[in-house]
Amino acid sequence: MKAVALREHLTIEHPESLLDLTLDTPEPSDTELLVEVQAVSVNPVDTKVRAPKDSILEAPKVLGWDACGIVLAKGAACELFDIGDRVFYAGDITKPGCNSQYHTVDQRLVGQAPKSLSAAESAAMPLTSITAWEGLFDRLRVDLEADNSDRTILIIGGAGGVGSIAIQLAARVAGLRVITTASKPESIDWCLRQGAELVVNHYKDLPGQLRSLGFTELDYILCCNDTDMHFEAMCDLIRPQGLICAMVDNRKPLDNAKLKSKSAGLVWEFMFTRAMFECDDILEQHHILNEVARLLDEGILSCTMRERLSPIDAANMKTAHAKLESGSMLGKFVLEGWGDSNASIGASSKQ
């Protein structure tokens, strides 16, 4: 099968940073689906895993944790899907990624793809939607059953992949008042179109800007960008007994004592936790994706795909990685199709 992979951890400018390879088609285990991949999207985790590091790879490493495709085969214990179903998922960072023609994935991490979206549009949504959903509803404990119209959330980094769908979920599904951050006219407009009520500049004094707008404290903060840069401002702005959720690694120690007098909390969101540790509630990602698909099909949520290239190959993947690393990406970057040789291997059930 075709795949885009790396043999060394290199800068994206290096000619061999990503390679077009031919690899063996994987076999699904009893609890896995074999998916014919139609489209994939690229996330910051891809660039971080690919980036230069000291470790030596013993075999080619396939990246990619966002896919839409067709179920070609399934393990004997798989009961959630049928062969021929169109599915979308983010998968498991401890397993080979989905930047390959055929990919195996635990059925509990997979949802039925939205019927109203194309394969490319569907591939844009899984990782960011799960991350935003878990951040809002699992980590920050926003109550979906409550009247949240008088509650405020600050989403730092609203124009990126996670921020874009987090704004929609917070405003359109949870009914929160959403303030977000962006610094360029295009990204400000993008955030407002996702449902943000106000947009402030994350390169300027956040507490000062918000207080000038009448916000002295916030019920929730979701930080999708540079935890170190914004930590003191978040500690200043969070209400007593409030919660901050961060998802970007800190580069230096964070002074959590700043939160003590408020009895406020800092929690982390890592979308791969449930898969990595095989948590008892791993099936929640299946339910989240099915609910996201429903919300997309009903027009409550909108797709965040902004750029698309075809086919899925090393050259186009390098373009996507470079765009993400530039810091100028709005929404999601998707690659679709495998060119003329994307022949099916046939559908079967592993018994």
Image (cartoon, rainbow, N blue to C red):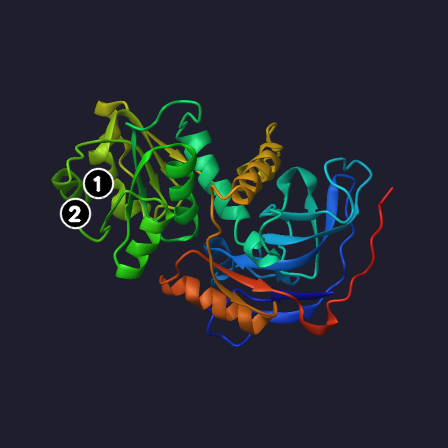
Q: Position of residue 195 (x, y in %)?
A: 35, 44
- For label 1, count other residues whose C-alpha is less than 10 Å away and answer few (under 14), some (14-19) or many (20+): some
Question: Which amino acid, mark 2?
Answer: Asp
Tell which of 311 and 250 is nearer to you. Answer: 311
Q: Is residue 175 left or right of residue 206?
A: right
Element at badge 1?
helix
Element at badge 2?
loop
Residue on which the image places disc 1: 233
- Location of the C terminus by quadrant is top right
Q: Position of residue 123 (x, y in %)?
A: 57, 54
User: How far apart are labels 2 and 1 at the CA level?
Assistant: 8 Å
- Are the residues tagged 2 and 1 within 8 Å (C-beta)? yes
Question: Which amino acid, mark 1?
Answer: Ala
Residue on which the image places disc 2: 205
N-term-proximal mark, 2 vs 1: 2
Residue placed furthest toward the bottom: 15
